[in-house]
Image: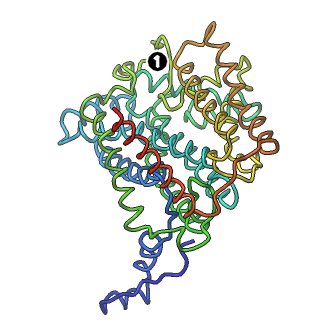
Amino acid sequence: MSGPSTYQPQSPLMKWLEQRLPIAGLVHSSFIAYPTPRNLNYWWTFGAILSMMLAVQIVTGLVLAMHYTPHVDLAFDSVERIVRDVNYGWLLRNMHAAGASMFFIAVYVHMLRGLYYGSYKAPREVLWILGVIIYLLMMATGFMGYVLPWGQMSFWGATVITNLFSAFPVVGDSIVTLLWGGYSVGNPTLNRFFSLHYLLPFVIAGVVVLHVWALHVTGQNNPAGVEPKTEKDTVPFTPYATLKDVFGMSCFLVFYSWFIFYMPNYLGDAENYVPANPGVTPPHIVPEWYYLPFYAILRSIPNKLMGVIAMFGAIIVLLFLPWLDSCKVRSSRYRPMAKRFFWAFVVTCLVLGWLGSKPAEGIYTTLGQVFTFFYFAYFLIVLPVLGRMEKTLPLPNSIAEDVLNKGKVAKAVAGLVAVLFAGG
């Protein structure tokens, strides 16, 4: 926990402000003096990377919205005009389009890190649930943003995905009509999606504030999965975690920049550079890559309603993860069987993503059904059973002991390498 602020303002102006609005004290206690587990690794920098990417998406989106025209007859041309005629429009468009993919790459790494190290377990259940809510909002925002260029894949993707709600009995058709603003995807649909795409990032930012607040109440998890017991277990957030976050963000920016400047369309679809035409259906309708695992789950089930339930259930099940995994040991470093099943789950997600990009026919459908079963089995069978049966390795007594043990291992490895080179 961050605890009460120890910030002592020096200037008369800051003393006066601190008595009336203690913002400086809040920042000091949350981002400077905040005690951070001393054994955090670079997987923990993805929280800062996600905050950076959210800021990039909001800023670039605001500027793009100033030049975009949400009308079916003008939307496609307005995007082209942004790229060609607006000063640095090509850069803003590339940053925003590639930034969506970067955002999802970072969030998937962030979630898998939480899954591996048990960051969803008590007392961090609410922290995890808020993270899943952010993920759901990201998916909705990303889908609506993909519709805005009004290319072929935008139009047909919107048609296919919104039609899924018609599978729900009684209310399904009413939901679809409400989303469309009529009886087909058209101008009212585009206006609705533009309004929501503009609004939802600010909702995400609000939930992120709650997420960070919950983090500062319960404290950060760590690779060992043991709670800090003494001051030796923690270090101040600044400069230790801050420098690590800055380095991690810098490396991620290099990766991001490669897509912006050298292959901005690599993660997109060529069909979306053709204006939307309701009379011509693309040969293969696929969503953006970050939806493909769930798209594969949807298509693997022959019944439309059950497919939609399975697709949404694949995300909703994450909300119940803190109670599905009953093992008292958090980190998979000390759970040999859980570690193996975790990597099998990662492979399952990758295969589902690959299957989502393939036609829904033949062997692809069969494999989709098999790996859909594996996906749900991990949460509903594997984790509950392992929590009761797995024999875990002994945990370190403290975070400081974990750090010392890693230091001893590093020295031993360095000594072995030195002996090998000396012998050579």
In what quadrant of the picture does the N terminus appear? bottom right
Write the residue at 70% across / 37% down: 337
Residue 81 image offset from top left, x and y in percent: 24, 33
Residue 64 image offset from top left, x and y in percent: 31, 44
Residue 162 image offset from top left, x and y in percent: 58, 30
Counting labels gives: 1
The residue that label 1 is drawn on is 278
Residue 75 image offset from top left, x and y in percent: 35, 32
Q: Is residue 397 left or right of residue 54?
A: right
User: Toward which corner of the image does residue 356 lie, by quadrant?
Assistant: top right
Label 1 sits on what residue type?
Pro
Write the residue at 60% across / 67% down: 228
Q: Is 5 placed above or below 11 here?
A: above
Write the residue at 68% across / 61% down: 123
Residue sitting nearer the eye, 188 or 320: 320
Q: Which residue lies furthest to the top in this view?
A: 362
Residue sitting nearer the eye, 220 or 10: 220
